[in-house]
Image (cartoon, rainbow, N blue to C red):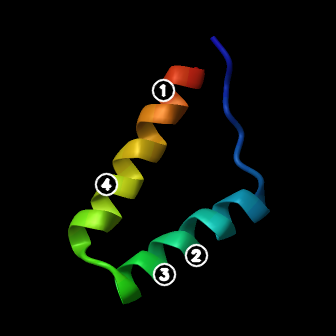
Amino acid sequence: MIQIIWTERAKLDYWGNIEYLERDWTLTNVYSFMDKTNDLIEVIN
């Protein structure tokens, strides 16, 4: 199993994307982005 370690830059980029989606898109889009990100991380692991 591979452990994914998020850099500070990656964390900032991720939360920046969340903030953008919250500001300009629907909550459904925010949750979809988060779910897809989590799904991808699970596949990589």
Disc 2 residue type (three-letter):
Gly
Left or right: where 11 falls relative to 36: right
Q: Residues within 10 Å of mark 4 (few under 14, many from 20)?
A: few
SS under mark 3 = helix
Tell me whether circle 3 and circle 1 mark residues in contact (CB < 8 Å): no
Disc 3 residue type (three-letter):
Tyr
SS under mark 2 = helix
Q: Is residue 40 above or below residue 29?
A: above
Which mark, by number, is residue 29?
none
Closer to us: mark 1 or mark 4? 4
Tell me whether circle 3 and circle 2 mark residues in contact (CB < 8 Å): yes
Residue topped by disc 3: 20
Sequence order check: which comes first, mark 4 or mark 3?
A: 3
Tell me whether circle 2 and circle 1 mark residues in contact (CB < 8 Å): no
Residue at (76% x, 61% y) in the render: 8
Quarter of the image with the C terminus is top right
Give how far apart the Cα atoms at labels 2 and 1 are: 21 Å
The picture places residue 1, in percent across and down from the top left corner, at: 63, 11
Left or right: where 26 falls relative to 4: left
Residue topped by disc 2: 16
Closer to us: mark 3 or mark 1? 3
Closer to us: mark 2 or mark 4? 4
Tell me whether circle 4 and circle 3 mark residues in contact (CB < 8 Å): no
Residue at (77% x, 53% y) in the render: 7
Q: Is residue 8 above or below residue 19?
A: above
Give how far apart the Cα atoms at labels 2 and 4 are: 15 Å
Residue at (38% x, 87% y) in the render: 24
Tell me whether circle 1 and circle 4 mark residues in contact (CB < 8 Å): no
Which mark, by number, is residue 32?
4
The picture places residue 19, in percent across and down from the top left corner, at: 47, 80
Residue topped by disc 1: 42
SS under mark 4 = helix
